[in-house]
Structure formats: C-alpha cells, structure tokens
C-alpha cells in the first residue's frame, strides 16, 4: 500500500470516488470490509460506504451519525452507495477521527439489505 498503514474497519478515510466529478475534493468514507481483508498484503482494495452531510433521517438506506460519533459534522452513511476502492487511493485524515463501532457497521449491513430489497435478519 505504498508505505501507508492499512485502514481498519470502522475508520473514516478520504477518497475520490469513481462516480465523483474530477474537480470534486476527496469524500469521507467509512471502511466496512473486515480487517482480515483490509490488512492482507494481496488484497489491494477495501469496501467503503460514503458519508454525506445531506441528512434525511427518514431514508432507510442511510445511517445517521452525530458529530460526536465521527469527529466530523453530522452526517449519514449512504449504504446504497457501497463501493470498492483501491487502498492506494485512500487518503488518511490529517486529524484524528473516531472509530465507528461494530454495531454501527452492522447497521450499514442492514441498510444494504434494505437497498437490495431484502429483509434485514
């Protein structure tokens, strides 16, 4: 990973998403793939979910996060936009952000099921 440390599940990093316009600044994303994959030397990608500050608490595929939970402005995880990015494209935050809990990541998994039209377990 070009000398960078491996991202951990629940961490917030920045990346230019493939769907973003070229002029857009890197976006915050939360790492949702398991650490066994994230740290594996042969795995060059991680699974991420983008964050947005356009908050709509009634959207079942969004997971709301308070500022105190992330270290950022209040935001939502957009579970319907889960994507894979190269580890080499990740940009580590310049300031310490908070690690999201396993329970929060599992809420994202449930929201992905909703986005796919499946019942959460």
Image (cartoon, rainbow, N blue to C red):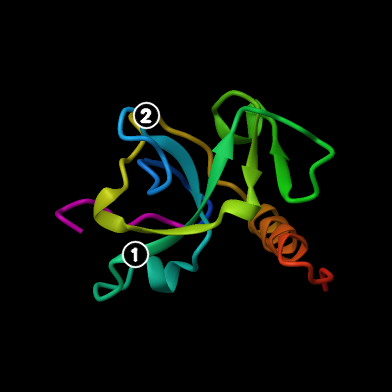
**Frontmost residue, 69 versus 33:** 33
Q: Is 5 situated above or below 117?
A: above
The image quadrant where one finds the N terminus is: bottom left
Quick one: label 2, few (<14), some, or many (20+) residues within 10 Å?
A: few
Q: Circle 1 sits on which residue? A: 45
Q: Secondary structure at mark 1?
A: strand
Label 1 to label 2: alpha-carbon separation:
22 Å
Q: Secondary structure at mark 2?
A: loop
* Front one among 100 and 43: 43
Q: Is residue 45 left or right of residue 77?
A: left
Is 7 inside the magenta-drawn segment? yes
Secondary structure predominantly adopted by residues drawn in magenta: loop
Q: Look at the picture and state if 13 lies above or below 31.
A: above
Q: Give the residue at x 74% y 62%.
A: 110
| Disc assigned to residue 29 | none
Quadrant of residue 53 in the image?
Answer: top right
- What residue occupies the far left of the structure in this picture? 2
Q: Earlier in the sequence, mark 1 or mark 2?
A: 2
Q: Position of residue 43 (x, y in %)?
A: 30, 72
Question: Taking 106 as reference, is 22 above or below it?
Answer: above
Question: Which residue occupies 38% across, 65% down?
Answer: 38
Instruction: Give the percent coordinates (x, y) of residue 72.
Output: 55, 27
User: Which is in the foreground here, disc 1 or disc 2?
Assistant: 2
- Where is residue 70 drawn, in percent x and y? 58, 34
Q: Residue furthest top?
A: 73
Query: Which of the image's four quarters has the C terminus?
Result: bottom right
Q: Was residue 38 drawn as part of the magenta stretch in this picture?
A: no
Q: Which residues are magenta?
A: 1-8
**In the displayed structure image, the side of residue 33 where residue 92 appears, left or right:** left
Q: Could you tell whether 119 is left or right of 5 in the image?
A: right
Which residue lies under the disc numbered 2? Answer: 24
């Amino acid at each position: 990973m070009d000398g960078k440390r491996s991202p951990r599940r629940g961490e917030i990093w920045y990346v230019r998403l493939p769907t973003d316009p070229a002029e857009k600044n890197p976006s915050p994303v939360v790492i949702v793939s398991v650490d066994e994959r994230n740290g594996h030397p042969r795995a060059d990608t991680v699974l991420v979910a983008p964050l947005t500050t356009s908050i709509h608490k009634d959207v079942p595929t969004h997971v709301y996060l308070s500022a105190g939970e992330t270290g950022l402005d209040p935001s939502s995880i957009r579970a319907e936009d889960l994507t894979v990015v190269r580890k080499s494209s990740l940009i580590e935050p310049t300031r310490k952000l908070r690690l999201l809990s396993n329970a929060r990541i599992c809420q994202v998994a449930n929201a992905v099921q909703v986005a796919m039209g499946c019942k959460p377990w």
